[in-house]
Image: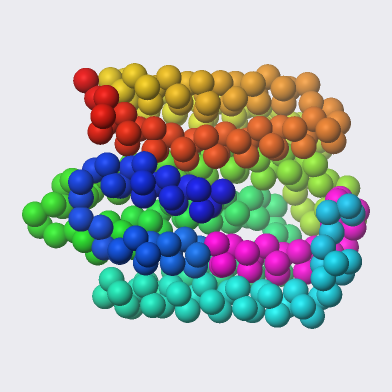
């Protein structure tokens, strides 16, 4: 999903804007690989520390301790993480911003801290995961737009960067809801491991009602965004209404009556699709602006 998001940003949006970009295409592909490797390392280290919880919540999907040994998993974690940071170091020097490698180091460190300590703190784990997903969009602006900005194109580049920030905020909000739903889905294993989540503190029913209320925040904000920025882009507006707002409304309706693991899993997948379609929307907007804008 991260790779598709970043490819969509490049081909569906940035290249449609006729602006200078700091990285060549093959270097941009390296940026995608670095992002994926850091993320993969985060998943691996999290699964290493989540073996007991996963044995309860999703025993059929366990890989570490069943198909892969813990030592092999640690080696994979180190390999993915160091390779991702190494690529980030190279790209940071390509754009003549060597300090930017700190971004990759901080993301890797945050994923490690999340797996080992931070996910014990209620809501903080949801915020961290959602923020890192959002940052996978912003990092494109940091490496493609910011270094190519000068006094001749500052206003145009600022506008393009602001669109990426807008979509990263949308991705954060929707994934934040999904992380809470996943906590409801995993409540049994989290409780046994002493992990504090909203469903454990508030109870499942109250948490679901809270998510119902929170789900209208992205709905209202996205509708407002369409009205202010996209109303003249007919295809983009119809796409977002059909593939983002529609599923969010469906989610809000279904979350009110959800009462089983099957329901929670279904709703989590609905939000995953909303994030996916929401990021594709940036490509629809770019194409609509380039070819069909009135």
Q: Quadrant of residue 266?
A: top right
Q: Quadrant of residue 204?
A: top right
- Mainly helix, strand or loop, the magenta region? helix
Quick one: 110 or 65, which is closer to the camera?
65
The residue shown at (40%, 58%) is 139
The residue shown at (59%, 43%) is 175
Q: Estimate the x, y position of residue 55 in percent, counting from the top left.
A: 90, 58
Quick one: 187 or 149, which is closer to the camera?
149
Q: Estimate the x, y position of residue 108 in percent, counting from the top left.
A: 56, 70
Is residue 49 on the magenta stretch? yes
Regarding residue 209, the answer to whether it shows in the image is yes
Q: Which residues are magenta?
A: 36-58
The residue shown at (67%, 45%) is 179
Regarding residue 191, the answer to whether it shows in the image is no
In the picture, the quarter occupied by the C terminus is top left
- Up the image or down, 198 lies above or below 211; here it is below
- Up the image or down, 163 lies above or below 116; here it is above
Is residue 25 on the magenta stretch? no
Q: Estimate the x, y position of residue 226 in percent, counting from the top left.
A: 37, 25
The residue shown at (68%, 62%) is 43
- Up the image or down, 262 lies above or below 14; here it is above
Which residue occupies the extreme left position in the image? 152
| Residue 51 horizontal side relative to residue 110, left or right | right
Q: Estimate the x, y position of residue 24 in percent, counting from the top left.
A: 30, 63
């Amino acid at each position: 999903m991260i790779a598709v998001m970043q490819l969509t940003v490049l081909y569906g949006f940035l290249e449609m804007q006729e602006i200078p970009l700091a990285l060549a295409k093959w270097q941009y592909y390296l940026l995608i690989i670095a992002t994926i490797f850091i993320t993969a390392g985060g998943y691996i280290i999290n699964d290493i520390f989540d073996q007991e919880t996963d044995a309860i919540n999703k025993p059929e999907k366990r890989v570490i301790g069943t198909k892969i040994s813990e030592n092999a998993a640690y080696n994979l974690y180190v390999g993915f993480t160091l390779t991702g940071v190494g690529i980030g170091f190279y790209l940071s020097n390509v754009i003549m911003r060597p300090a930017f490698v700190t971004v990759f180091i901080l993301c890797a460190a945050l994923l490690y801290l999340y797996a080992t300590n931070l996910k014990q703190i209620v809501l903080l784990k949801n915020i961290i995961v959602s923020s890192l997903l959002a940052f996978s969009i912003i990092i494109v602006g940091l490496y493609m737009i910011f270094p190519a900005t000068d006094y001749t194109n500052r206003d145009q580049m600022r506008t393009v960067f602001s669109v990426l920030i807008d979509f990263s905020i949308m991705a954060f909000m929707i994934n934040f809801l999904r992380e809470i739903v996943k906590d409801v889905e995993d409540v049994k294993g989290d409780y046994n491991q002493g992990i504090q989540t909203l469903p454990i503190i508030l109870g499942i029913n109250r948490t679901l009602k809270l998510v119902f209320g929170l789900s209208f925040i992205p709905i209202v904000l996205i509708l407002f965004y369409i009205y202010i920025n996209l109303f003249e882009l007919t295809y983009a507006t119809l796409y977002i209404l059909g593939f983002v707002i529609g599923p969010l409304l469906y989610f809000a309706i279904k979350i009110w009556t959800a009462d089983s693991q099957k329901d929670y899993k279904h709703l989590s997948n609905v939000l995953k699709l909303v994030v996916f379609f929401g990021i594709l929307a940036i490509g629809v907007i770019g194409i609509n602006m380039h070819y069909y804008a009135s």
